[in-house]
Amino acid sequence: MKGVILVVLIAAAALLAYNYVHTGKLTLVPSSLSKAEQQLQRLEQRLDSARRQFHAAGRAAGVAGVDTSADAEAARREVERVEADLKALREQIEEADKLKAEELMDEIQEFKKELR
């Protein structure tokens, strides 16, 4: 009996983790996202990836003294592409998703200030 309960708890924890990674919400049953929400989520993931790449380049340059300007420049270009894609997407999305798009644009602008 304890084994069955343990398997159920592990399965529920795995499902929670899977849903959190894919939707950003802790739920057992994932809600279906609209196409615009999915696109916004992908843009947010790309921004986070560029942010991590930029910070990793800064750490590598500080610790090892290695020239990581190419990595930092690649991160900056990716942020520019995300911003352009977001501007194009904002023209197509509904009012309900515009708030999320504005929040993402604010994050982009904050990160661009950090790049300078």
Image (cartoon, helix red, strand yellow):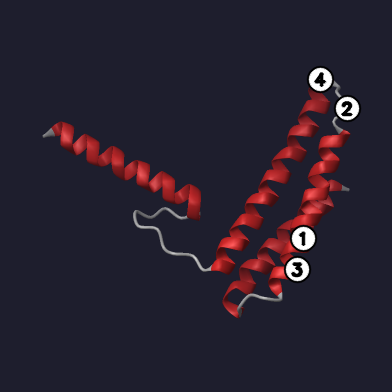
**Quadrant in the picture for residue 80:** bottom right
Q: CA distance from mark 2 to mark 3?
A: 33 Å
Confirm or deny contact between disc 3 and disc 1 (CB under 8 A): yes
Specify the farthest residue to the left: 1
* Of labels 2 and 3, the one closer to you: 3
The residue located at (49%, 65%) in the rendering is 33
Q: CA distance from mark 3 to mark 4?
A: 38 Å
Confirm or deny contact between disc 2 and disc 1 (CB under 8 A): no
Q: Which quadrant holds the N terminus?
A: top left
Query: How dense is the environment of label 2, judged by Cα within 10 Å: few (below 14), some, or many (20 and up)?
Result: few
Q: CA distance from mark 2 to mark 1?
A: 26 Å
Confirm or deny contact between disc 4 and disc 2 (CB under 8 A): no
Circle 1 SS class: helix
Q: Decide if residue 12 is on the left or right side of residue 73.
A: left
Q: Earlier in the sequence, mark 2 or mark 1?
A: 2
Q: CA distance from mark 1 to mark 4?
A: 31 Å
Please tell me the numbered disc located at residue 64. 4
Which amino acid is tagged 2?
Answer: Asp
Please tell me the numbered disc located at residue 83. 1
The residue located at (62%, 62%) in the rendering is 40
